[in-house]
Amino acid sequence: MWSLATSLATVGSLLSVADAISRVTSSIEENGSQYLGFNGTISAKTTYPSSGSCDETFGPFAKSYFYVGLNPPWDSNPFFFELYHLASEGSGGPVTFTKDDVYNLDFGSSGYVCYSEGKPCGYFETVWYYQSEILLDLTKAAVKKTKVGNEDGYEISGDQKTYLKNETERQSLNRVDVDSECGQFNWNYDFSIWNETSTWSYTFSFSNTTATGSIKTTLGENSMEITYTGERMTNATEHPNIELVSTDDSKPQFRFSNDSDIHFKNSTHGEWLVSAEEFPAESSSSSRAGFAAPTSTTRRGGATGTGTAGVTSPTGTGAAEVLKASSGIIAPLLMLGGFFAL
């Protein structure tokens, strides 16, 4: 996933949208991700003691999604997760204007993104391939079996020590936009990207029906906490028929609901096929039932750890990017042919 760290204040800021339109992101079909999907809300709280003890609370904001599951062997992590919230409102089009105070949130462990000639894909490419991008090393996180509500589930927790720094160009980031009225600009920008320069921690708990979590960030005396709660999405055909297996006390496993293992096959351009049945031996398939890491890194296209959140939401706003705008500029923008969606 990719995103623009921008807050739209004038019509002139539309120049930054050109980059948003020119990018291509991965999809569920291409990266082969098999996952549990949860639909819920996020809320946030910020504190700024250095600005006169200014505290703010935001939300809850709907259309917030949590995903947890299994990737093909391109992912060096034993499983993946992602917290994702573009905006509560809007559908269709590459850009949406939102009234949310917390938006463009994407925090995940790994991703699979389109590249061409060593660069992130543009809008049109004749030659391309997919490359893994890993943001978090989940082998350094703590994972344990726990009760989530009344069900068996798992909790994963970690901090900035699990972050994997990448020296090359990265298509996506773990980041968020927060429209704070009492924070300093530099502080707002610094805590908008979760990397090695800030102090942060995360905890997520999930079962087959419920997910909760939080991300806490500190910078000097200032702090921000984002919390999430959601329920499983099970009545939509675009969500894989996957279940969490909680028989192991130390690690989650995933399988199809008919008790079949998840089998992967690498296809054209690095796209992945998924089946409950084993692929023929000559098709170079692999099976991953849960926590075991792949035995070879060559299946990641020779890429070292890079990247970001793994799943493009099939049920989000439908926008590629969300911009914060005052009501005074929304009307003239809508006159541009309905290209932008509210």
Image (tube, helix red, strand yellow):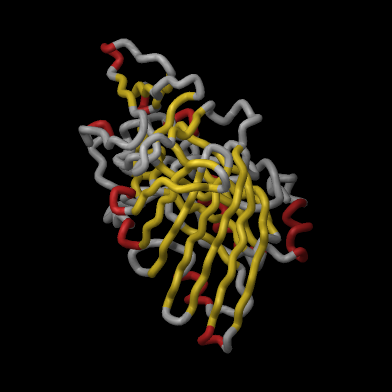
Residue 256: percent from left, percent from top: 47, 24
Q: Residue at x 71, y 51 (%)?
A: 89
Q: Is residue 319 left or right of residue 4?
A: right
Q: Residue at x 32, y 56 (%)?
A: 162
* Number of numbered discs: 0
- Give the vertical position of 182 relative to 99 (above or below): below
Q: Nearer the viewer, residue 30 or 52?
A: 52
Q: Residue at x 74, y 45 (%)?
A: 337
Q: Nearer the viewer, residue 179 or 92?
A: 179
Q: Nearer the viewer, residue 40 or 267?
A: 40
Q: Is residue 90 left or right of residue 279?
A: right
Residue 126: percent from left, percent from top: 41, 29
Q: Nearer the viewer, residue 188 or 227?
A: 227
Q: Is residue 234 left or right of residue 278?
A: right
Q: Is residue 293 left or right of residue 125?
A: left
Q: Quadrant of residue 161?
A: bottom left
Toward the bottom, the furthest residue is 52
Q: Residue at x 77, y 51 (%)?
A: 335
Residue 319: percent from left, percent from top: 62, 45
Residue 332: percent from left, percent from top: 76, 58
- Give the vertical position of 84 relative to 221 (above or below): above
